[in-house]
Image (spheres, grey):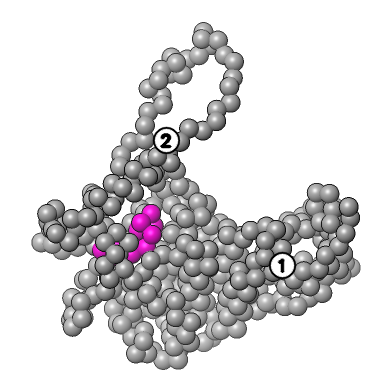
Amino acid sequence: MSGTYKTVGINLKGMPMGESDRLLTVLTREHGLIRVVAPGSRKHESSLRGRSGLFVVNQLLIAKGRTLDKIIQAEGVESFTGLSQDLRKLTAGQYLAELALCQALSNQPQDELFTQLSESLRRIEQLPASATLPCLVQATYQLLKLAGVAPQVHDCCVTQQPIAPPSGMSPEARGEWRAGFHAAAGGVVCWEVLSRMEPGEILSENPQDSQNPHDPALASTTAVLENRESLNAAVRSKPKPIKKVKASSDSMTPAAKSPATLAEPEGRYAIARSRPQSTAGSRLGTPISATELAVLQRLGDSELIAMWLQADRSPVVASPWDSHPPHEVWMRVERLLRHYAQYHFDRPIQSAALIETCFAAVSPLSCSPTQDATD
C-alpha cells in the first residue's frame, strides 16, 4: 500500500540513476539509513538539484515505493558549504561519511549517529584549516566509540595494566619509551606484550633491551593469546555451505582430487589474511611513542581541540608536543585509528588515499596551532 512519511536526513552518498534522477543514500534520525530516488535532480531547473548534494541536511517528504522510495519534497536545513571550499575539509567529511555508512543501520532510529556526524562536520567546517586533521582524528574516535568498537587506550588489552610512561622521566628517556597499538587485540598493549604477539616483526630500538621470556609480568600473556587464538580458530573452522556441482572424476585435475588443497591456515596469526587488503598488507601491531599514547588517551576529552588551538603549550596537552611537531603526531594517530577501523569494520576506507594526499604532504608549520589561514 502506498503512503508517505517525513524525516530529517543528511546525504552521505549519491549516484546517477536513469537519465535525470539521482539515487541517494541518506542517514535519517527516525529511520536510519535509507536509499531514495531524487527524481529529476540532475536537471538544471530542478528544485531538488541543490538538495541532493553531499552533506546537505533536508527535511524530507518521501513516498513509499515497491523497491525504492521517492523524494516528493525537500526543504534544506543545513548544507555545510564550507567543506567544499577546502580540499582537506572536504576529504575529512567524506572520510567521516564512510565511517558512518560502515555502522549505520536501516529501519532503526539513528539519532545519536546523526547528531555525532553533524556535530563533527560542523566543527570541521567552522574551525580553521589547521585544526582539520585533529578534528578528524577525534571525530573518528568518537564514531568508533558510538559503534562500540573504540580502542582501549588507558590499559593494556592483554594484561589489563595501566599504560603510561613512568613519572619523572627525562625528555631523552621519554623520547625512547615505547608501547604498542594492536588492532586485533583491541587497542594499546605493553611493549613486551606487543613483542610476543608479533614475534620477529617488532624489534627493540635499544639492542640491550632484550626480552626475558620468564618475566613474571608476562606470565599470563601466552595464556590469553592462546585462548583468543583458539576462539578465532573455532570461527575459522565453522563449516560453510558449499554449492554442489556435478563433475566426473575424469574432468577433475589432480590438484582438485587431492585433499591437500584444503590445507589449514599456516602460522599462528593466519586469521589476519582474511581481513581487507588495506589492513592485511600492514602489521596489525605497531610501536607507539609516549607522545602518540598521550594523544590517544586524550581523544575522549571534548575540549581537547579548543585547548590545542588556544595555546602552543597547554598544561593538558603539553607533553604530546614536546617530542614531535603536532602535525606528525596527529598524522600517525590518524593512521592507527584508520587501520583499526578498517580491521573492525572489515572493509577498506576509500577516502584513505585522499587523506594521505591531502595531509601527509603538509608541513608542520602550516598546521601549527597558531596558523589559522586556509590554503
Residue 102 quadrant: bottom right
Residue 88: image location, x then y, percent: 56, 72
Residue at left 44%, top 88%?
307
Q: Residue at x 18, y 83 (%)?
A: 168
Q: Determine the CA span between mark 1 and mark 2.
A: 39 Å
Q: Could one spot residue 54 in this view of the protein?
A: no
Q: Is residue 209 magenta?
A: no
How many residues crowd around disc 1 within 10 Å: few (fewer than 14), some, or many (20 or more)? some
Give the SS element for disc 2: loop
Residues 286 and 152: in front is 152
Q: Name the image quarter holding residue 27.
A: bottom right
Q: Position of residue 59 (x, y in %)?
A: 79, 73
Element under disc 1:
loop
Seen in the picture, residue 153 relative to 365 is either above or below; the reply is above
| Number of numbered markers | 2
Identity of the amino acid at label 2? Ser
Nearer to the camera, 28 or 177: 28
Label at residue 30: 1
Residues shaded magenta: 179-190
Work out whether 229 lies above or below 322.
Answer: above
Image coords of residue 106 (percent x, y): 67, 57
For mark 2, does the 10 Å Cα neighbourhood hold few (<14), some (14 to 19), or many (20 or more) residues?
A: few
Q: Residue at x 41, y 24 (%)?
A: 261
Q: Which amino acid, by three-letter code, is at mark 1?
A: Glu
Residue 321 shown left or right of residue 223 in the figure: right
Q: Is residue 201 left or right of residue 66?
A: left
Image quadrant in which the C terminus is located: bottom right
What residue did someone put label 2 on? 237
Give the percent coordinates (x, y) of residue 85: 64, 76
